[in-house]
Amino acid sequence: MANQDDSFIREVNEELRSDQMKAIWMRFGGLIVALAALIVLGTVGKVGYDYWQETSSSQSGDAFLAALNLARDNKSDEALAALTALEKDGYGSYPVLARLRSATLQAQKGETEAAITAFSEIGKDTRIPPALRDAARLRAAYLLVDHGTYEQVSSEVEQLAVPQNTMRHSAREALGLAAYKAGDFAKAKSWFQQITDDTESPRGVVGRAQMLLDVIAASGKA
């Protein structure tokens, strides 16, 4: 991933001479969001796996594994049906994990609005562990970067973009990307600067933030 980030950033830097902000976003915006979303997906998987391992095994565990296998085999409709059943009748942590996986499958199928709604609802459900709620909010926010407004992204994750939150780096990135896409380069610069100034920010997030700070500086718009 580091090599991909470095290559990607070098390619974008070559585009700085053109000073075409819209063209840069049209060419690279989707990849930026995709790279960022990979981090969140990894977080969802890790937190979900830890949560799953802490629960007792049951028939629900077997049903969840079967649904994951269907998804892996690209049988999305069958996987969604199995996960929906698990949401209703599952035991312990499995209904929550089924909701998360269902929302991810909806996003992969292009059912973006449904996926955003699902992730947002998970993020507001106080019965769910905070780490999973935060990860769901981030997934909703990254989808909203391309399919919503800055205000919608902010309503999902600005509460996470605080120094004490371990997911602040991704939250700030989502906010910066949303502001950048909306043409509010001053606000985008502020969020990206917070990432680069934070010594605990992951290398990949810092690299993308610095690249976009360079783009904004070259444009002279902030």
Image (cartoon, rainbow, N blue to C red):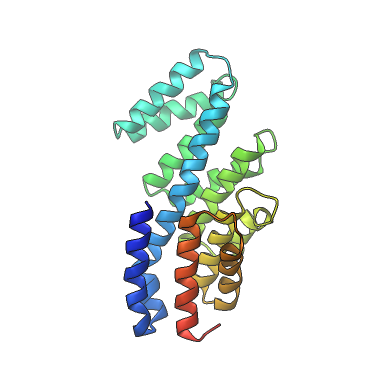
Residue depicted at 47% across the width and 35% down the height: 101
Rendered location of residue 83, percent (x, y): 46, 28
Asked if 136 appears above or below 159 in the picture, the reply is: above
Asked if 177 appears above or below 86 in the picture, the reply is: below
In which image quadrant can residue 149 be found? bottom right
**Quadrant of the rendering where the C terminus is positioned:** bottom right
Rendered location of residue 110, percent (x, y): 38, 49
Residue depicted at 45% across the width and 56% down the height: 204
Asked if 53 appears above or below 45 in the picture, the reply is: above
- Closer to us: 218 or 117: 218
- Closer to us: 103 or 137: 137
Figure disc tally: 0
Residue depicted at 56% across the width and 44% down the height: 136
Rendered location of residue 50, percent (x, y): 55, 29
* 73 left or right, relative to 50: left
Most extreme residue toward the top is 58
Residue depicted at 50% across the width and 86% down the height: 220
In which image quadrant can residue 211 be found? bottom left
Most extreme residue toward the bottom is 220
Rendered location of residue 175, percent (x, y): 57, 63
